[in-house]
Image: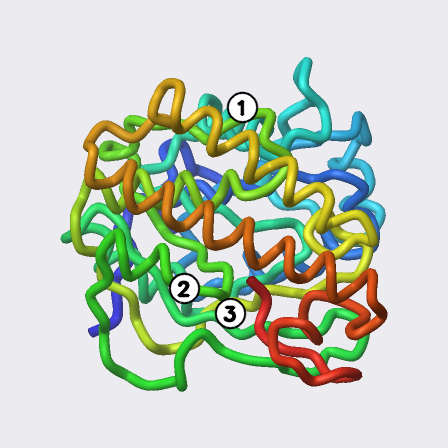
Amino acid sequence: MAFRQPERYSDPGLLTMPLVSVITPAYQAQPFLARAVRSVLSQTLQDWELLVVSDDGLDYRTFLAQHGLDDPRMRFVGPGAAAADPGAARNRAIAAARGQYLAPLDADDLFYPERLERLVPLAADSGMAGDNVRVVDDASAVALATLWPEGRAVRSLGLHDYAQTSVPMTFLFRREVVAWAWEEGLGLGEDTLFNLRGFECLGRVPVIEVVLHEYRVRHGSLCHAPDSAARAETAYTNALERLAQAGLGFRTPQARAVVGEMLIARRRLNQAFQASLAAGRCRNFQEFITGREGEGAAAA
């Protein structure tokens, strides 16, 4: 059943308390931010606000207006003390958000038109909801993989299930249940930890098998730059140290054990990728993870 928007939000010009706050940090995002913004503007559920967080000092309001993108539902948050830290940028957005739901969207990714409409009812019942994801090579626009074969069912994922996934997922959260923040200063992986805290808090989470957003593999991004393996090694080591010292924000021994196992496994995989890259057996992580040189694959 389609989710019907409340009538009091039918006029975007009168918007005061939006249903959904979409959160988008922007760092050197000029080549692709307009695409992400258009994907939000195209949502069938129109009761949203979009918070663009400048994490590089650029005036993104003016930049987007120059590309014909000017909407009263778009809000702009300036850089904080920790520029180029996506976790800190997202935390600034949470502080400014007014919506009943939070929807993180990376500046180089995009939502499909029905995403918010399909996920809000699920998150209303469960506190958090997710969807299938399509991995797309940004340069060629070629689809590389999906998390699962696309279907119509709704899966139920737990903490351990999510920790085993190898394709980046994005969730919609009911604002009132989010009592945690994005980890700051890691450099990579803060989204995964944020999502895992949601699983620890809420238990099992509904995830629809329909593909409702794209994760773009963009060469040169933090996750796919030439130094991404070294960055990942630092991030995993840092996260494991924080987990051992203070639990990394996780409250239960069970959750800490699952997160520790996940971080160790991902660090070992990353170290194997570093060795393969140095030996010339692959050109990027996608080739490494599938063992197929010259082809793309699912991103970890």
Q: Which residue is rendered at x = 78% and y = 73% of the image?
A: 282
Q: Tell me which numbered mark, 1 or 3, is placed earlier along the sequence.
A: 1
Q: Is residue 296 left or right of residue 182?
A: right
Measured Cα–Cα span from mark 3 to mark 2: 21 Å
Above or below, 180 relative to 267: above
Q: Tell me which numbered mark, 2 or 1, is placed earlier along the sequence.
A: 1
Q: Secondary structure at mark 3?
A: loop
Give coordinates of residue 129: x percent, y percent: 29, 56
Q: Is residue 220 left or right of residue 232?
A: right
Above or below, 200 relative to 169: above
Residue type marked 3: Tyr
Q: Which residue is mark 2?
A: 165
Q: Quadrant of the image for the C terminus?
A: bottom right
Q: Which residue is rendered at x = 76% and y = 37% of the image?
A: 60
Give coordinates of residue 195: x percent, y percent: 37, 45
The one of 7 and 124 positioned closer to us in this rendering: 124
Residue type marked 2: Thr
Q: Quadrant of residue 121?
A: bottom left
Measured Cα–Cα span from mark 1 to mark 3: 25 Å
Q: Which residue is rendered at x = 54% and y = 43% of the image?
A: 189
Give coordinates of residue 279: x percent, y percent: 83, 67
Q: Which residue is mark 3?
A: 112
